[in-house]
Amino acid sequence: MTITQEVENSRNGQRESITEPLIRQRKASIHEESPQLEGNGNGGSMFMVFLSTFVAVCGSFDFGSCVGFSAPAQSGITSDLGLSLSEYSVFGSIGNIGAMVGAITSGKVSDYLGRKGAMRMSSIFCVVGWLAVYFAKGSVSLDIGRLCTGYGMGVLSYVVPIFIAEIAPKHLRGGLATLNQLMIVTGVSFTFIIGTLVSWRTLALIGVLPCCVLLVGLLVIPESPRWLAKVGQQKEFELSLRKLRGKDADISQETADIQDYLQTLEHLPKAQILDLFQRRYLVSLIVGVGLMVFQQFGGINGICFYVSHIFEAAGFPSALGTVIYACIQVPITGLGALLMDKAGRRPLLFVSASGLLGGCLLLATSFYMQAHEIFLEAVPTLALTGILTYVGSFSMGMGAVPWVIMSEVFPLNIKGTAGSLVTLVNWFGSWVVSFTFNFLMSWSSYGTFLLYAAVNLSAILFIAKMVPETKGRTLEEIQASMNRS
């Protein structure tokens, strides 16, 4: 199989067509993937893949703990340190600023230090941040700590799904990558619940624990073999792949596929941010950025950050509603992880976006009925149903699948730069939605959810038109097909 790559000459504008082998011609028997190649039936290899994934998603759990910390800690911090509402608002929102900085640098950091090095660095930032919050005597230390944990979140949100995608066999890649989102929502729910039982300082100290597990685990697990091959560490590449697939596994074809693909990439220039808009990368960029835009601007962080306020406005007990909200995320996200490599990415996205649309319409209806005093006794139940439909649908697909697809569609030579851009878009959207939600609710409560419903309807159309199915395909096969699009 071959692909034709156009290499642009920046000096004279001339283009020359270069045909490079993407995947070498092999005998048909070699092209048939053996169970041993993928690690099926090899306990040792699957153990290392699962262990490596567990270590990586400890970072995702801490990510969720950072996201969930500000809600249960608000009353304790404001009373203990005498912070005003505006000072606490700065503390709560500055994490997004740190995350945006982390997103900008995440691709370069993970390309330069490696996937393990990036996770190690971000976990150190999180440890420093949590300790700064724990020992805080005023707003300055709190804000510095939150900024540090935010930066760690920004890097982790990119590097964890990338690392998992690059180490996992293709038949498990989607399910394992979904564990990233599962552990994020588990961290959020855990922090919501534990935060009602312990002080805010103790809660900050608990946030250090997953970072410590991550730091220790990184000493044991192998580096991403694809990154090692990319930076020319051939011996380490083969050792890492052997460790992941098992000492008795036949890794010859997988090794050759990765090396052939990297050989093709050698003819492409090192990507800068403007290079992402070249025609050869445009489809991948539209898919990656588009999914993140619809994920965030569909309203998730407005609903997540202010769910208590929504319940209160609808006349439903906020404490009970928040606990139900926290508990429903984890099992449904787990179900999505199980279905990822069975149902496929596109079906999950369709079901999820449709559920988000339905949840927003239910919420809009409940607030419309409240505003016009129609069946007021039904408003709280309808609002609860809408929120549970929304969060359940988001947890099923739109929470995790965009990150999985982001880790799959970009070729290695632009993955760092593209990943930084996509992650930055995600965090920028998070900040915009969380910042504007209260203003929108003041304008029109039901109009707010109609606006989010329109975004989620657009997401359904976008998925149908642009998003490819990546289930059961190697990263090299996915990227070859994107080049042909």
Image (spheres, helix red, strand yellow):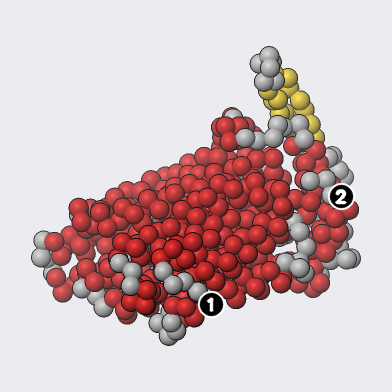
Query: Can the viewer see residue 231?
Result: yes
Question: Residue 405 placed where, x, y %?
Answer: 58, 51
Q: Look at discs 1 and 2 and give the one toward the viewer.
A: 1
Within 10 angstroms of label 2, few (less than 14), some, or many (20 or more) residues? some
Q: Residue at x 25, y 53 (%)?
A: 440
Q: Which residue is mark 1?
A: 205
Q: Choose between 377 and 276: the one closer to the eye.
A: 276
Say what amino acid the circle numbered 2 marks: Gln
Q: Is residue 358 left or right of residue 205?
A: left
Asked if residue 306 is positioned above or below residue 13 in the image, the reply reads below
Element class at badge 1: helix
In the rendered image, the residue lying farthest to the bottom is 197
- Report the Cα–Cα distance between label 1 and label 2: 41 Å
Rendered position, 145 above or below 293: below
Disc 2 element: helix
Residue under pointer 2: 234
* Label 1 neighbour load within 10 Å: few <14, some 14-19, many 20+: some
Q: Quadrant of the C terminus?
A: top right
Q: Residue 49: x and y, percent?
A: 73, 66
Q: Residue at x 53, y 77 (%)?
A: 205
Residue at coordinates 49% horizontally, 61% vertically from top-left? 144
Residue 401 shows in this picture:
no
Quarter of the rendering occupied by the N terminus: top right
